[in-house]
Amino acid sequence: MKKKLLFLFSIAIAAILMSFATAQKSSKPEKAQTTEENGFSIPDNVKSVLDRSCLNCHGIDGKGKAKIKWNYEKMPSYSKSKLISKLSKIEDKINNAKMPPPRFLKKHPDNRLSQEEKETLTNWASGLATDLSK
């Protein structure tokens, strides 16, 4: 009889502890979605172009007077509509030769985008925007 009571008591304590642990878990804020969960990803070839030619101004530590800052860590947490908007702006600015701006390139000619780099960025931006909008 004592063994049965001890066994039931152990099960009751375990159940209480499990419910307490579950309640604490659910009260913690969820982490931002990873890039794979919301469909946002940056291939290495795109990231290298962004790092070399864009982040001098647009990076979180950028020294330029960019209106829009680029933060790799925050991008996956953006809503799909915000990501699509940013990607569309990238494509538009590059296709219209507004980025990097000619005035900036006079002082920093190494940041000039080659035709291949422009295509890499615009193909990535338009393809990802299309995928996210599905």
Image (tube, helix red, strand yellow):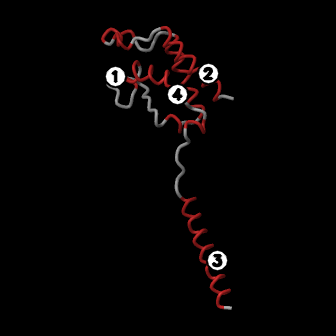
Report the disc number at residue 91. none
Q: Amino acid at mark 2?
A: Gly
Q: Secondary structure at mark 2?
A: helix
Q: Secondary structure at mark 1?
A: loop
Report the disc number at residue 11. 3
Q: Name the residue beneath numbered marker 1.
A: 64
Mark 4 Cα within 10 Å, few/some/many (few <14, many 20+)?
A: some
Q: Secondary structure at mark 4?
A: loop
Q: Name the residue beneath numbered marker 4.
A: 42
Mark 4 or mark 3, which is nearer the start of the sequence? Answer: 3
Q: Position of residue 130 (x, y in %)?
A: 64, 24
Q: Are marks 1 and 3 in contact (CB under 8 Å)?
A: no
Q: Compared to 60, does 96 lie above or below?
A: above
Mark 4 or mark 1, which is nearer the start of the sequence? Answer: 4
Mark 3 or mark 2, which is nearer the start of the sequence? Answer: 3
Q: Residue at x 54, y 50 (%)?
A: 30
Q: Name the residue beneath numbered marker 2.
A: 127
Q: Are marks 2 and 3 in contact (CB under 8 Å)?
A: no
The Cα atoms of the two marked residues, 2 and 3, are separated by 54 Å
Mark 1 or mark 2, which is nearer the start of the sequence? Answer: 1
Location of residue 106 (image quadrant) = top left
Choose mark 1 or mark 4, whichever is in front: 4
Q: Position of residue 94 (x, y in %)?
A: 49, 14
Q: Position of residue 4 (x, y in %)?
A: 68, 86
